[in-house]
Image (cartoon, rainbow, N blue to C red):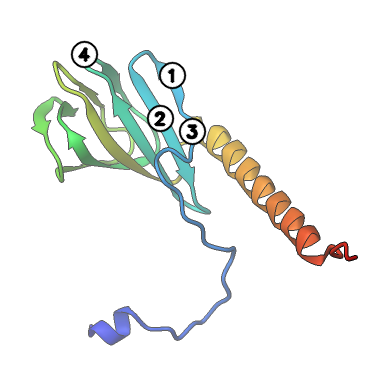
């Protein structure tokens, strides 16, 4: 496959929604366990979740139906996949298939990582949808206020 084929603008479909930009601090955190802050960002068929581990924090060993890819952005943590434990650092990636036991913990360091889930992780979807909808409503409101201002008559002498 050539680069041209990979980056083609030929479409066999219509966009299903508008794109958007989201930064890690644009999403309100949810904390299921002390020391772990989750900031989920939902797409239409996937979910990315910024996760910040405080020092000496743990995501207990668990399983779920969603496939997960873990990407470390900063710091380090010990990550376990089905009994195999590795220290992960910036740029390291782990792939966790559905129903495979896994967990993680920090020691005297913090860790910022991104989890990508497909399908979206059900325990994070409600939080992500509520935040996305609130952000879209705020943007629509700001746009309508701006339009009213732009169309308002200017008082003259």
Residue 101: percent from left, percent from top: 26, 27
The disc, 4 or 1, on the residue closer to the chain's N-terminal end is 1
Q: Residue at x 27, y 20 (%)?
A: 54
Q: CA distance from mark 4 to mark 1?
A: 16 Å
Residue 148 image position (x, y, % from top left): 80, 59
Q: Pointer 1 and pointer 2: residues touching (CB < 8 Å)?
A: yes
What is the distance, in whole Å, between disc 2 and disc 4 at their CAs? Answer: 16 Å
- Circle 3 sits on which residue? 124
Can you tell which of label 4 and label 1 is closer to the viewer? 4
The residue that mark 2 highlights is 38
> In percent of the image, x 28 and y 41: which residue is there?
97
In percent of the image, x 40 and y 36: which residue is there?
65
Question: In the rendered view, does 15 fall on the left or right side of 77?
Answer: right
Looking at marks 3 and 4 on the same chain, the residue that comes earlier in the sequence is marked by 4
Rate crowding at label 1 as few (under 14), some (14 to 19) or many (20 or more) other CA atoms within 10 Å: few
| Spatial CA span between label 1 and label 3 | 10 Å
Q: Secondary structure at mark 2?
A: strand
Q: Label for residue 56? A: 4
In the image, 156 versus 140, the foreground residue is 156
For label 4, the crowd category at 10 Å Cα-Cα, with few meaning under 14, some 14 to 19 and many 20 or more, is few
The earlier-in-sequence mark between 2 and 4 is 2
Callout 1: helix, strand or loop?
A: strand
Is 74 on the left or on the right of 152, as rendered? left
**Quadrant in which the C terminus is drawn:** bottom right
**Residue at 55%, 77% in the rendered image:** 13
Taking 152 as reference, is 46 left or right? left
- Which residue carries the number 1 mark? 32
Query: In the image, residue 99 lies at what x, y percent?
Result: 32, 33
Secondary structure beneath dot 3 equals: helix
Question: What crowding class fits label 3: few (fewer than 14 Cα within 10 Å), some (14-19), or many (20 or more)?
Answer: some
Q: Are marks 2 and 3 in contact (CB under 8 Å)?
A: yes
């Amino acid at each position: 496959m050539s680069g041209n084929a990979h980056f083609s603008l030929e479409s066999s479909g219509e966009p299903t929604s508008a794109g958007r930009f989201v930064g890690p601090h644009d999403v309100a955190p949810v904390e299921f366990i002390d020391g772990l802050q989750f900031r989920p960002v939902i797409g239409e068929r996937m979910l990315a979740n910024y996760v910040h581990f405080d020092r000496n924090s743990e995501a207990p060993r668990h399983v779920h139906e969603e496939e997960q890819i873990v990407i470390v952005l900063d710091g380090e943590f010990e990550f376990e996949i089905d009994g195999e434990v590795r220290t992960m650092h910036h740029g390291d990636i782990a792939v966790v298939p559905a129903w495979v036991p896994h967990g993680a913990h920090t020691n005297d360091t913090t860790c910022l990582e991104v989890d990508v889930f497909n399908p979206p992780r059900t325990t994070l979807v409600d939080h992500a949808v509520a935040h996305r909808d609130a952000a879209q409503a705020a943007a629509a409101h700001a746009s309508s206020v701006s339009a009213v201002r732009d169309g308002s008559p200017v008082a003259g002498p």
